Image (cartoon, rainbow, N blue to C red):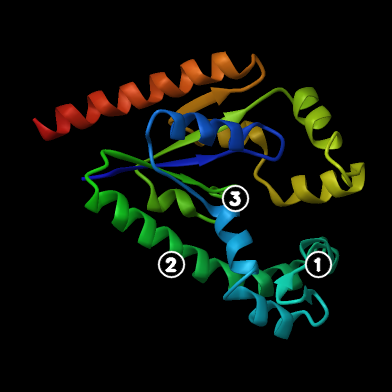
Amino acid sequence: MTFVLGLTGSIGMGKSTTAGLFRALGVPVHDADAAVHALYRGAAAPLVEAAFPGTVREGVVDRRALGARVLGDPAALARLEAIVHPLVRAEEEAFLARAAAAGARLAVLDIPLLLESGGERRCDAVAVVTAPPDVQRARVLARPGMSEEALAAILARQVPDAEKRKKAHFLVDTSRGVPAAARQVRDIVCALAARSGRRGA
């Protein structure tokens, strides 16, 4: 049986880097953001255009134009999520089926809004990627096109880091650099491998 680990963390915490560290250890990872990017170039594009006219250019969703339409508008965001979430869930289920068929003991679901969407119910455990607030803020504001206002809007949609950490089975602190984060990820994989071995005995 494949153990499903949910991986999440607020913006700027280093979640994508951490997902890469799991991949480097041979753990299959499903990236919900990457799935959305692919859907925005494919199946989701006509549905998004129908709901938000003018947000698709040459068959591809313009994420900046779409963001301008939905950020700060809960009703618009709910319409978008009703379009995208079922498509992403279908991709996720196919990924887990492939992982199980391949005999994977562990699979990771990399989902930015895992706790906000109740996605932890689909997981056997949750790992939260974290860093101090000043590190998070500096990372996010260094991104092209990011502003204090945009950051505030994003954080308003996310469960606070302190609350995420309370709900975590595992923590990965990325503030001490990649080698330290890699050691934490390796410890998680080893702990789950040991647990899986005991369960299968």
2 in relation to 137, above or below: below
Name the front one of labels 2 and 1. Answer: 2
Q: Quadrant of residue 142?
A: top right
Q: Which mark is residue 113?
A: 3
Q: Residue furthest bottom?
A: 50
Q: Quadrant of residue 35?
A: bottom right
Name the front one of labels 2 and 3. Answer: 2
Q: Is residue 61 left or right of residue 21?
A: right
Q: Residue at x 64, y 69 (%)?
A: 41
Q: Secondary structure at mark 2?
A: helix
Q: Which mark is residue 90?
A: 2
Q: Earlier in the sequence, mark 3 or mark 1?
A: 1
Camera-side residue of 146 and 161: 146
Residue occupied by mark 1: 73
Residue 160, given in percent of the width and then of the height, sits at: 67, 39
Query: For the residue marked with disc 1, what is the amino acid?
Result: Asp
56 in relation to 131, above or below: below
Residue 191, given in percent of the width and then of the height, sits at: 32, 22
Q: Residue at x 27, y 42 (%)?
A: 104
* Within-10-Å neighbours for mark 1: few <14, some 14–19, many 20+: few
